[in-house]
Amino acid sequence: MTTVGVLAIQGDFAEHRAALEKLGVEVREIRLPDQLDEVDGLIIPGGESTTIVQLIDIYEMRDKLRERIMSDKMPTWGTCAGMIVMAGELSDHRPEPLHLMDTSVSRNAFGRQVDSFEADLEVAGIDGPPYRAVFIRAPVFISVGEGVEVLSSLEDGRPVAVREGHMLATAFHPELTDDQRMHRLFVGMVEEGKR
Ligand code: GLN
């Protein structure tokens, strides 16, 4: 049985849980560092990155997260605020990201006028019709390192989904639509990691 953890300290973890359960995956809500030993993969959900990082530090999860994700190579996916949390560096002063990926990220990159929007994306590794992606106060990648594969970009060329080995990050919210293809892609990465 594949067990996927969802960091459940703030944000839309319940929606991720529901999407994973539809795929028949065992889900654990993660609120304490040691719970990270019980899962094969982790999703860091959308929400408010400053709050998520603040709570990660209050619950003393930073070191354990880095150990499981960087040393053990536990497959991990950050959506929206989660992508900010996983970033290598931010153009913003806050929060202090976990410095997991070789990415440079800007928060709230689309500004207030286009707070939220939807876009049809081609995503590498996903078959069938274009993927309808929901963006809410979304971040963007300013740049990504050589080892980072861009899976999808907006029409203007800005990347919005990337993979770096066992790590996945998306600027949009796959947990808010009925399309489970992104979750299936990630569960595939978790199953790969178990072999
Ligand atoms: N802009 C938010 C932040 O900085 C992220 C928004 C989201 O997760 N929908 O945390």
Image: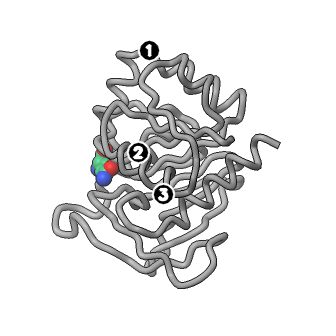
The answer to whether 142 appears left or right of 162 in the picture is left
Q: Nearer the viewer, mark 3 or mark 2?
A: 2
Q: Quadrant of the N terminus?
A: top right
Label 2 CB sits under 8 Å from any ligand 1 atom: yes
**In the rendered view, would you say 2 is above or below 131?**
above
Q: Where residue 45 is drawn, which disc sits there?
A: 2
Residue 58, percent across and down? 35, 16
Dividing the picture into quadrants, the one containing residue 93 is top left
Q: Secondary structure at mark 3?
A: strand
37 or 162, nearer to the observer? 37
Q: Amino acid at mark 3?
A: Thr
Mark 2 and mark 1: span between their CA atoms?
A: 18 Å
| Three-letter amino acid code at the position of disc 1 | Glu
Q: Is mark 3 within 8 Å of ligand 1?
A: no
Q: Classify residue 41 by image quadrant.
A: top right
Q: Earlier in the sequence, mark 2 or mark 1?
A: 2
Q: Residues within 10 Å of mark 1 (few under 14, many from 20)?
A: few
Q: In this figure, which residue is indicated by the disc labeled 1?
A: 60
Q: Which mark is residue 51?
A: none
Position of residue 138 measured from the top left corner of the image (x, y, whole percent): 33, 58
Q: Is residue 86 visible?
A: yes
Give how far apart the Cα atoms at labels 3 and 2 are. Answer: 10 Å
Identify which residue is drawn at 48% across, 76% down: 131
Amino acid type shown at disc 2: Pro
Quarter of the image with the C terminus is top right
Give the residue at x 33% y 64%. Answer: 135
Q: Classify residue 167 as left or right of residue 28.
A: right
For this view, does 71 lie left or right of residue 49? right
Query: Label 3 belongs to which residue?
Result: 170
